[in-house]
Each structure stands twice: as C-alpha cells, then as structure tokens.
Amino acid sequence: MNSPKLSLAQQRELVAAWQETGRILEAQRRCELAVQSPAQSRQAAFDMLQLGGMLPCDISRESRSGLVEMQRHFARWHSRGRA
C-alpha cells in the first residue's frame, strides 16, 4: 500500500492536528479520572490485572532470569581481583 507524499506544510499540519488531538484526549482522561469513585478505580485496576492475566506467557523468559549467568560473571570477576 503506497501512501501519498505529503508536502512539508501538510506534514506540519498533520503533526499539529495530532498534537491538539492528544491534548484534548489527555484533558478528557484527566476529567474522567477526577470524577471516578474509589470503587471505580479499584474495579479499573482489577480489570487491567485480569487482562494482563489473559496474555500468553513466554515460557523461555520464565525458565531463565539471567541471575545465574550474572552470578557466574560476578564470581569470575571476584576471583580475578584476588589472584
């Protein structure tokens, strides 16, 4: 899919429009958070945690944290310093 080439002026206009959109959305988000009850905040946090639990786990990352390798490097470094 080819996108049309935009002139520098059009690019700047597009960036300015997205900046304004971002500002408006951030203001809306802040207003919605300001009127949210503590119960609604707790429910939103719970919902986000539930969504995170639905993500597939990457088993390869869980089987090795890198801690053992790091300790091996530290042991080598420590033994070289004493020799």
Image: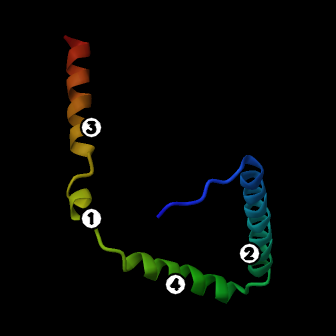
Cα–Cα gap, marks 1 and 2: 32 Å
Amino acid on which the number 1 mark rests in the picture: Asp
* Residue at 73% from the left image edge and 47% from the top image edge: 8
Q: Nearer the viewer, residue 42 or 12?
A: 12
Residue 21 location (% of width, % of height)? 76, 68
| Of callouts 3 and 4, the N-terminal one | 4
Q: Secondary structure at mark 2?
A: helix
| Of callouts 4 and 2, the N-terminal one | 2
Cα–Cα gap, marks 3 and 1: 21 Å
Task: Tell me, for residue 58, which label it has, or none.
Answer: 1
* Residue at 20% from the left image edge and 58% from the top image edge: 63
Which residue corresponds to mark 4? 47
Where 51 sits versus 83, above or below? Answer: below
* Residue at 75% from the left image edge and 55% from the top image edge: 10
Which residue corresponds to mark 2? 29
Residue 41 location (% of width, % of height)? 65, 82
Residue 80 location (% of width, % of height)? 21, 16
Amino acid on which the number 3 mark rests in the picture: Met
Which residue corresponds to mark 3? 70
Residue 51 location (% of width, % of height)? 44, 80
Cα–Cα gap, marks 3 and 2: 42 Å
